Amino acid sequence: MGEVTANVENTVRGWISSGEYGPGSRLPSERQMASTLGAGRTTIRLVLAKLAAEGLIRSEHGRGYFVCEPSR
């Protein structure tokens, strides 16, 4: 994993763990994250797909990415 990808992943995880984006919150759009984090949209998509596979976030087609409830 490259440095930019790691930075994006750490930033998004930080947003979630700090409560900036709590359960049910919609994350910024791919385009907004790419601009804010200085990464390409492909990198953003890869990180979001990884976090979705882990169950940390979920994708809703046409709506965006949302933070999942923590598993118990």
Image (cartoon, rainbow, N blue to C red):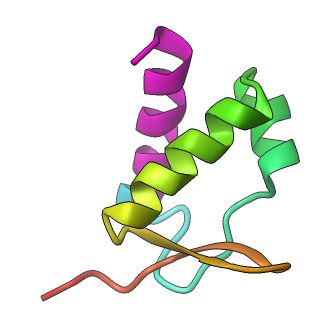
Residue 6 forms part of the magenta stretch: yes
Against 47, residue 37 (above or below) is above
Left or right of residue 21, residue 50 in this image: left
Towards the viewer: 30 or 22:
30
Residue drawn at the location 34% of the way across and 72% of the way down? 55
The image quadrant of residue 59 is bottom right
Question: Residue 4 at what x, y percent from top left?
Answer: 55, 16
Where is the N terminus found, in terms of image quarters? top left
Against 34, residue 16 (above or below) is below
Left or right of residue 26, residue 51 in this image: left
Residue drawn at the location 31% of the way across and 63% of the way down? 54
Residue 72 forms part of the magenta stretch: no
Q: Which residues are magenta?
A: 1-16
Residue drawn at the location 47% of the way across and 11% of the way down? 3
Left or right of residue 10, residue 37 in this image: right
Residue drawn at the location 43% of the way across and 80% of the way down? 68
> Total marks drawn?
0
Q: Main secondary structure of the magenta part?
A: helix
Against 1, residue 63 (above or below) is below
Where is the C terminus found, in terms of image quarters? bottom left
Towards the viewer: 2 or 13:
2
The image quadrant of residue 70 is bottom left
Against 30, residue 53 (above or below) is below
Question: Residue 12 at what x, y percent from top left?
Answer: 51, 46
Question: Residue 20 at what x, y percent from top left?
Answer: 54, 61
The image quadrant of residue 62 is bottom right
| Residue furthest to the left | 72
